[in-house]
Amino acid sequence: MNIAIIGTGNVGGALAQQLLKAGHNVLMGAKFPLSEKSIRLATIIGEDRFAAIENAVKQSEVVIITTPPDVVLQIIPELANIKGKTIIDATNSIRSKPGDYPTAFHAIKDITKSDAVVKCFNTTGFENMLNPVYKGEGIDMFCAGNDKIAKQIAGQLAKDIGFASCYDFGNDDKVELLEKLALSWINLAIMQGHGRDIAFKVVRR
């Protein structure tokens, strides 16, 4: 699958590395000249994996947005034509929000008028995306949104990079709840001092 990742920070970099390992074609949508963090990532995945945002999106079927949420309003116009593409929002509006929107997901849907938007890859740290396996067993990922096909695509990508399952958290009305799950992980890992090597796993009796 051809995938554009917008955002070259920890999450974007982790997803890029794992998706490439899984056999997907990944382009990083970035501004030029490249920032220091983009250059660091380029040394890992190759400079040829970087393109202007519009060009990266044009060549891809799936667009994953991993920027800070307050940057999303600047990014959306650069996506250009997203007709027929799945957009995965991997951001969390915990410390900042995109304007008057409650989350980046809501901003993306409203401005692009696309139904194929799904929230995913936001509920754990980037370390768990680089290595989602604990004691031989994959941890779990979660997604939310109205579009069933978009959720299926996000779920398959999650499994491709090593997550055991990607649970459907519900429709658009559960997006903010899913961001609260992300805040719960942050609370445990950082605020309560349990460390970043913890993860969520749904178990059944």
Image (cartoon, rainbow, N blue to C red):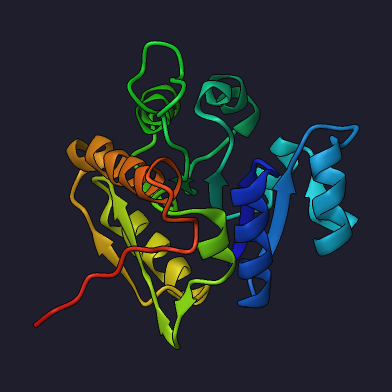
- The answer to whether residue 86 is above or below residue 83 is below
- Which is more toward the observer, 201 or 168? 201
Where residue 13 sits in the image (x, y, percent)?
Answer: 68, 54
- Looking at the figure, which quarter contains the C terminus? bottom left
- Which is more toward the observer, 197 or 132? 197
Compared across the picture, whether 170 is left or right of 130 comes to: left
- The answer to whether residue 49 is above or below residue 71 is below
- Which is more toward the observer, 193 or 171? 193
Where residue 96 sits in the image (x, y, percent)?
Answer: 46, 21
Asked which quadrant contains residue 42, the reply is bottom right
The number of callouts visible is 0
Asked which quadrant contains residue 166, the reply is bottom left
Q: Is residue 116 visible?
A: no
Where residue 49 sits in the image (x, y, percent)?
Answer: 80, 56
Q: Is residue 172 visible?
A: yes
- The answer to whether residue 142 is above or below residue 33 is below
Where residue 164 sits in the image (x, y, percent)?
Answer: 37, 77
- Which is more toward the observer, 66 or 81? 66
Compared across the picture, whether 124 is left or right of 203 comes to: right
